[in-house]
Image (cartoon, rainbow, N blue to C red):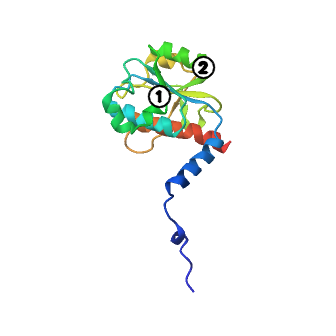
Amino acid sequence: MSTPDPAQGRRQLRATDVKRLNRDWRRRTEARLGLLIESVTQPFNMGSIIRSAAVFGVEHLWLAGNATPPTHRNVAKTALGTDRLVSWEHAGTAAEAAAAVRKEGLRLVAVELTTDAVPLHEAPLGGDVCLAIGSEDHGCSPALLAAADAVTYIPQVGRVGSLNVAVATAIALAEARRREWSA
């Protein structure tokens, strides 16, 4: 007698099933999540970041420095319409953006490699938090790092020492939500 193949009954979810699944996850989500984006200038990176922000329920984006705004025509190519789902503002300098984040009652955690950064899985991501990311080339500015409540990094074991800023943002957002869902 042969063993039944568990994958036989497997099928991709229909659109209505996906909506139901996402609604169930939204019901499990209470913490507020924000994102401070400093000087990310490549429109395709910004579009990808915005799409990830919409996926993980980021309530607001604070742009600082010379970050490309969501209204840039090339941002929309990657954001695929999700730019209308996340509110945003250009908050000025990194220090001004950090102050705006705090005014909203969010703790600010920068994603950067620093001497005091903790691995992402140990970062203080519980409760209402705003992740801060920096530019593609130079990361978070000294002003942003000084304003952050904590700094975290994504451990990397391969032979490459860095991630694309949009990918790193998606990983950090996913970890913040995973932490809440598994608590």
Residue 122 position in % (x across, y down): 60, 36
**Does residue 15 appear left or right of residue 149 in this picture?**
left
Q: Quadrant of residue 27?
A: top right
Q: As shown in the figure, which amino acid type bears the numbered disc 1?
A: Glu
Looking at the image, which residue is at 53% across and 52% down? Answer: 18
Residue matched to label 2: 104
Spatial distance from mark 2 to mark 1, Cα to Cα?
23 Å
Residue lying furthest front: 16
Q: Between residues 162 and 106, which one lies in front from this camera angle?
A: 106
The kind of secondary structure element at disc 2 is loop
Assess disc 1: are there few (<14), some (14-19) or many (≥20) residues with their C-alpha within 10 Å of its C-alpha: many
Residue 125 position in % (x across, y down): 60, 32
Residue 144 in sight:
yes
Quarter holding the C terminus is top right
Residue 162 in sight:
no
Q: Quadrant of residue 49?
A: top left
The kind of secondary structure element at disc 1 is loop
- Circle nearer the viewer, 2 or 1: 2
Looking at the image, which residue is at 45% across and 44% down? Answer: 157
Q: Are marks 2 and 1 in contact (CB under 8 Å)?
A: no
Q: Quadrant of residue 176?
A: top right
The vertical placement of 2 against 115, above or below, is below
Residue matched to label 1: 112
**Does residue 138 appear left or right of residue 108 in this picture?**
left
Q: How many marks?
A: 2
Residue 61 position in % (x across, y down): 49, 26
Residue lying furthest right: 183
Quarter holding the N terminus is bottom right
Looking at the image, which residue is at 56% across and 79% down? Answer: 3
Q: As shown in the figure, which amino acid type bears the numbered disc 2?
A: Glu
Residue 182 position in % (x across, y down): 65, 44
Assess disc 2: are there few (<14), some (14-19) or many (≥20) residues with their C-alpha within 10 Å of its C-alpha: few
